[in-house]
Image: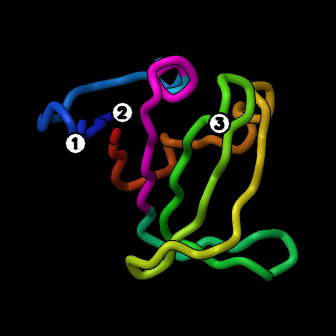
Amino acid sequence: MQVYDKIKNFTYDEEKYRLIDLVQYHNRQVNLYFDEVKTDEHGFIHWDMENWCCVDGRRFIRTYGIEGRIRKEFSGYNVYDLENYFLPETASKVELA
């Protein structure tokens, strides 16, 4: 998938496992932008952007954004949860910050 690196200021192809490695071990964050508004299974949270970062090399946090604003809701995950919840291949734009 195409990833835009905001620090190095260029676009390149990257795999999902490599993005997880950059977040987990290299203190980077990944921003995913979607064309449509997503919602959780309860209809409580609506978002069109996700921000993924790692707390301590083991715990990942996903924050949500909609229409350019970051929401106060967030979710916590471990590295094994990322297979089901971290889906950069479904995003219309992927940024590495």
Label 3 residue SS: loop
Q: Classify the position of the N terminus by image quarter.
A: top left
How far is the residue under mark 3 from the one under mark 1? Answer: 20 Å
Q: Which residue is mark 3?
A: 55
Q: Position of residue 82 (x, y in %)?
A: 70, 34
Label 3 or label 2, whichever lies nearer to me, is 3
Q: Nearer the viewer, residue 10 or 35?
A: 10
| Kind of residue sitting beneath label 1 | Lys
| Kind of residue sitting beneath label 3 | Val
Q: Position of residue 89 (x, y in %)?
A: 48, 41
* Left/right of residue 17 with respect to residue 82 in the rendered view: left
Q: Nearer the viewer, residue 82 or 91?
A: 82
Label 2 residue SS: loop
Q: Earlier in the sequence, mark 3 or mark 2?
A: 2
Mark 3 closeness class: few <14, some 14–19, many ≥20 residues within 10 Å: few
The image quadrant that residue 29 belongs to is top left
Label annotation for residue 1: 2
Above or below, 73 against 33 in this view is below
**Magenta stretch: residue 80 in it?**
no
Q: Please state the extent of the stretch shown in magenta in the rendering.
A: 21-33
How far is the residue under mark 3 from the one under mark 2? Answer: 25 Å
Label 3 or label 1, whichever lies nearer to me, is 3
Label 1 residue SS: loop
Residue at position x 38%, y 77% in the image: 68
Label annotation for residue 6: 1
Residue at position x 13%, y 34% in the image: 10
Q: Classify the position of the C terminus by image quarter.
A: top left
**Magenta stretch: residue 22 in it?**
yes
